[in-house]
Amino acid sequence: MSRVLIIDDEEIIRENICELLELNGFETISAVSGQEGLDTADKYIPDLIICDIMMKGMDGYDVLKAVRNNKALKHIPFLFLSAKTGLDNIRSGMTLGADDYLIKPFESDDLIRSVNLRISKHKILVEDSEIKYHILFNQAIEGIIIIDSDANIIKCNNSFAKMMGYSKEELHDSKITDIIHPGDFEDFKSKFEELSGGKSYIHERRLVRKDKSTIYVEVSAVQHSPGLYQGMFRDITERKLQQKALEIAKEKAEAISRLKSTMLSSMSHEFRTPLSAIIGFSDILSSDITDTAQKNLLGEINHAGHRLFKTLTQILALAELESGDYQFEDTKFNISACTEALALEYREKASLKGLTFNIIKNDDELLFRGSEKMFVTALKSILDNAFAYTSSGSVTVNITKRIYKGEPCSAIDVTDTGIGIAKENLDIIFREFRQISEGYGRYFEGSGLGLTIAKKMMENNGGHLLVTSNIGKGSVFTILLPEYKQGKMVIAPNLQLATSSIVPGKESGVTEKKSGTPRLLIVDDNTSLRTVISMYLKDICYTDYALNGNSAVELAMNNTYDLILMDINLGSGMNGIETTNCIKNLDGYKEVPVIAITGYALSGDENNLLREGFDEYLAKPFTREKLIEKIRKFFF
């Protein structure tokens, strides 16, 4: 039986229409005003509304507007009933969305015919819409369900049943809470309360299939109709598994990276510490022994130690560059001054080999903003290479300005008169562990990493490393650096910019020196290193030593030291950083300099230790001269 709502403020007309419709098999409900009519329609959801136009308060036009703006009522056929006969009035009603218009007085047959026609048409439209909805519902790729306010599954489509591994009948006898993953249940309850309050949401959820496996879905939920809620589910399990696999792969890569960093740090420490003893003792013995043969043997030991140290340094530098762990400073420096600082070292090398070494500076004021350490390392690698492959003639460094690819650059040419490089080998020399002479026929020392590292370092500073060569005539290696400009340097994406190592409150390079013979505390758990340091300093300092952090703190409490040499790895107990902090907190030790002497010598270690409170840093292995140079910053 179809239900009709009659809204009219005239009681006689309202009752007559109700009686007439009931005699023709309709159920009727009525209201005496527009607002009462809307409230009644909301409560009973009629199949058709008959409404007078001229009413007090809310007239028929206002009622129609409200009905068409109500989601639950807007589809209901609407008939106007009025004594007004003007064409404009009829047009106004139709424009607002009325389905028909009856003029008072009207014939009973006209009313019944119009009501039957509108309800029939509406039913056809509804049935057609329901058929289309049913087809779309069941053919949808996404899973769709409708649940009631008690979370009972009222309806589901084929895709949802297939997704969950159940039949539709099995799901219709269950609740949505039966298939929600236990870990998502509380969140579901919260979201369902929001849904009941009229909100909609899109959310990711875990569901449990019939076979107890878990799937991930993206659910879009809305209120379907009063008391009913529709959810559309898209299976995103594969995407989530891929994300999980990527997360696991990322975690593994990060773990491998951390392991690699730890391994590099351990390698650096474990190689440098024994090398310190090898190089240190051979140095000390060589200065004390007068027998020429023995001095030569010690010289070979020392040379082998330095060679091994150089190889280790290159391998670790390359590993850091390739992993992106290499940290470098952002500084403005004078290219000519940096190059000139190497002059003494390479003039001595030239003298030993009978070569001529020259530095030609066409511009003393060429500046560059980048890593001074990288520049010096790269230039030294190129110079070492030039000396290694040149047996007679000269090695010359020429510093000048140049245009490269239309851009002004600083150019540093290193020209040698060595054996030269064949054209087909020019690319090989920049590859890792490659040399011109290889295998059993190899006739030059070296790891084959120097030029590889030099090229990478210059490219990471925005520069270039080029080479030209002729067999039998020599080679020219050219470093090209962009012209200095104000502003921050451009950091290569795979490298890290080191944080400033200047401690707040201390100006770099300004240190008040003490006079007299200083008393030093050496803190190192390695007997060999303590002995080397003590012998290096025996003529210029008084030295005590501690094997661990606790002993160092106790000695500092009971004695007065002018300077402390501190290792970082001190075995069990406090490490060097913790020990330094303890000592610095003792009365009278706040301003006592502490020099970190350590095998931790990767690119960021120096800055890290200086930020931890050390006043200076010295990497193992070191020479007597280098150690005394560090101490002289505070004494003599």
Image (cartoon, helix red, strand yellow):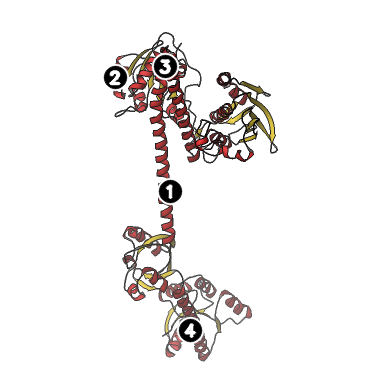
Give the x, y percent position of residue 546.
31, 20
> SS for tag 4?
helix
Q: Which amino acid does label 1 sit on?
A: Lys
Residue 492 in the figure: left or right of residue 567? right
Please, what is the three-letter code of the amino acid marked with disc 2? Glu
Any mark on residue 420, and which? none
For the N terminus, give its image quadrant: bottom left
Instruction: Work out whether residue 437 can be spotted.
Output: yes
Viewer-nearest of discs 4 and 2? 2
Q: Mark 3 or mark 1: name the one nearer the start of the chain.
A: 1
Mark 3 belongs to which amino acid?
Gln
Mark 1 vs mark 4, CA separation in Å: 78 Å
Dot placed on the residue nearer the N-terminal end, 4 or 3? 4
Q: Mark 4 points at which residue?
A: 13
Depth check: give the residue in front, 555 or 435. 435
Query: Is residue 226 shown to the viewer in this render?
Result: no
Q: Name the residue under label 1.
A: 250
Discs 4, 2 touching: Cβ within 8 Å: no
Q: Of the numbered discs in the image, which one, if any, rests on residue 294?
A: 3
Judge by depth and name the residue closer to the eye, 455 or 167: 455
Which comes before the other along the chain, label 3 or label 2? 3
Q: Which residue lies furthest to the top in this view?
A: 516
Q: In terms of depth relative to the viewer, which is nearer, 297 or 115?
A: 297
Residue that carries the numbered disc 2 in the rendered image: 554
